[in-house]
Image (cartoon, rainbow, N blue to C red):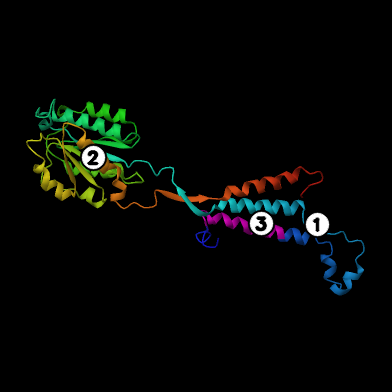
Amino acid sequence: MIAALAPFHFERPLWLLALLPVVGLWFLDRRGSDALLRWRAVIDPALLAHLIVGEARRTIVTPANGLLIALALTAMAAAGPAWQREPSPFADAKPAVAVVLKVTPSMLEQDLAPTRLDRARQKLADILAAREGASTSLIAYAGSAHLVLPPTPDSDVVLNLAKSLSPDIMPKEGDDLAGALALAKRALASQADGGSILIMADEVEPDAKGPPAAAAHLPVTILSLLPPSTGAERSGAAAQALNATIVATTADQTDVAAIVRRLDRADQARGVDGEGQHWREAGYWLTPLIALLALLWFRRGWVLA
């Protein structure tokens, strides 16, 4: 029993300060209800006991005591007593992901039918379907990077905006992956689990550095949108600089399954702890006692001035 109560604590201990005025009110009530208080100051206590005639027997159950006990129990319940842990309702929530989509003329090559960009959209649809309910942010980049959508669990909105992207609407050509990673870091900053970054590109330039992602310790995954005959080794140097994992595009769902597994364990890769459990508060067990004390006020003659 003692071992079970060893982790006992209050989640909101500042509420215990409300006990100070409760104790003060109790002390003032005791002094005010003592009719012999002024006589004790002038008559010897040993003699006063023999001079008292017809003193009514003091009862413990009084309106003042009932109110003060109810206030004390309310303060302790609000403080949140806890000593046991329970699974968090958000323990099964999937980590967020920032999808960084390359939108350059090279993504219109048709070596991955229909095009590399269309294949990226198809793979994105499969990934979102497998991670239903997970927050997803969308960033498009070419010569400049742009936040298309902040993290949202609405996969339909993500897909619709991804379908509207094309090299024609990008302000300038190039490969500003570093800027896209900076946007991804800011987009994921509001997420409790941190999340991870998924780069969908045909090639990642070897000189593309990733300080934003590295500084935030965000796991990075690269989906190489190149045909199997070409291989994903061309992005190996950049992947090493980003500490990223490269997943080659496949005709089946093998690549999607590998990416989903990596994205779903992103919080474990970052060492996030304490998200699976939280303290179970037991203050609600005091509610019936408070309610019973409140019923006493329905008794006739119970008045507190």
Cα distance in 3D space between marks 2 and 3: 58 Å
Q: Residues within 10 Å of mark 2 (few under 14, many from 20)?
A: some
Q: Amino acid at mark 3?
A: Val
For disc 3, the marked residue is 22
For label 2, the residue is 259
Badge 3 element: helix
**Residue closer to the observer: 171 or 26:** 26
- Identify which residue is drawn at 43% across, 46% down: 88
Q: Quadrant of residue 155?
A: top left
| Amino acid, disc 1 | Thr
Q: Is residue 46 left or right of residue 268?
A: right
Closer to the eye: label 2 or 1: 2
Q: How far apart in space, not on screen, are marks 2 and 1 (Cα)? A: 72 Å
Highlighted range, magenta:
9-26
Residue under numbered circle 1: 59
Horizontal side of residue 92 vs 211, given as left or right: right
Q: Quadrant of residue 23?
A: bottom right
Which label sits in the foreground, 1 or 3? Answer: 1
Q: Residues within 10 Å of mark 1 (few under 14, many from 20)?
A: few
The residue lying at 62 percent from left, 57 percent from top is: 19
Residue at the image position 67 percent from the left and 51 percent from the top: 70
Give the image location of residue 140, x and y in percent: 21, 35
Nearest to N terminus: mark 2 or mark 1: 1
At which x and y percent is residue 304?
A: 76, 49
In this view, the residue in front, 231 or 197, is 231
